[in-house]
Amino acid sequence: MKTKYVFLSMIMIIAFTLSVNGQSEYKEKTKSVVKKNDISSAMGKPVFELTVDSLNTKVWILTQWKYQKMMKTHMGKTMGKMKTDNKTMNKETKNAAMSGTNYFIFDVTNIRNGKEFADTSAKVEIVSPSKKVSSVILQPMMNHFGSGVSLKEKGVYLFTINLNIGSGYKTTQFKYRVR
């Protein structure tokens, strides 16, 4: 009787071993449910990044030449077709984006849930090396804010970003050197 159990156990062990080793080594590629921030993945390292409370802010400053080159790519064509408040981007907004010597991109996300803040507006105040002050209202784009800015002088600029988040204001300052 014991021989039957040992023999049956050996056959079952061999059968299970063969079935485990005979499994396919194909691994299915899955896509992440969490969508990466398109602007961050396309732009590379920002010139400024700060995380305070649940607010993560990133800034990129591109030359107009580099911005226009980027707009000819797939991402740029998608941005050109963007809609804000169910309206296509008007000519005035497109002209504001192309004005100045550089293009200013401001991205803000909620680090708790990874989403953009709703009902926000942004404005940047720029102090040039010769202490001239200018102000630009940043246009809401797909998932960031942007506008053309003039950085004609060489030296250190002081940027102050005023972000209106629903019922409150957040202010961020940083310096940027134009060579």
Image: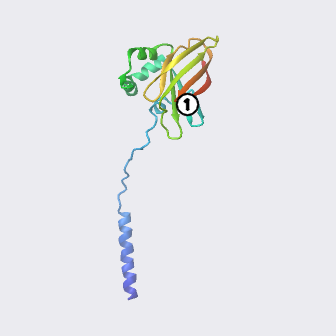
Residue 127 image-quadrant placement: top right
Residue 55 image offset from top left, x and y in percent: 56, 34
Amino acid, disc 1: Thr
105 sits left or right of 32 in the view: right
The residue that mark 1 highlights is 57
Residue 95 in which image quadrant: top left
Residue drawn where x is 55% and y is 26% of the image? 163
Q: Position of residue 150 (x, y in %)?
A: 53, 13
Residue 70 is situated, as x and y percent measured from the top left of the image, at: 43, 23
In the orientation shown, which residue stands out farthest toward the bottom?
A: 1
Q: Is residue 24 above or below residue 93?
A: below
Q: Nearer the viewer, residue 82 or 76?
A: 82
Q: Secondary structure at mark 1?
A: strand
Binning the other alpha carbons within 10 Å of mark 1 as few (below 14), some (14 to 19) or many (20 upward) gives some
* Residue 112 in sight: yes
What residue is rendered at 60% in x and 22% in y? 160
Which quarter of the figure has residue 23?
A: bottom left
The residue at 46%/30% (across/down) is: 39
Name the residue nearer the viewer: 59 or 70. 59
Horizontal arrangement in the rendering, residue 121 relative to residue 53 (left or right)? left
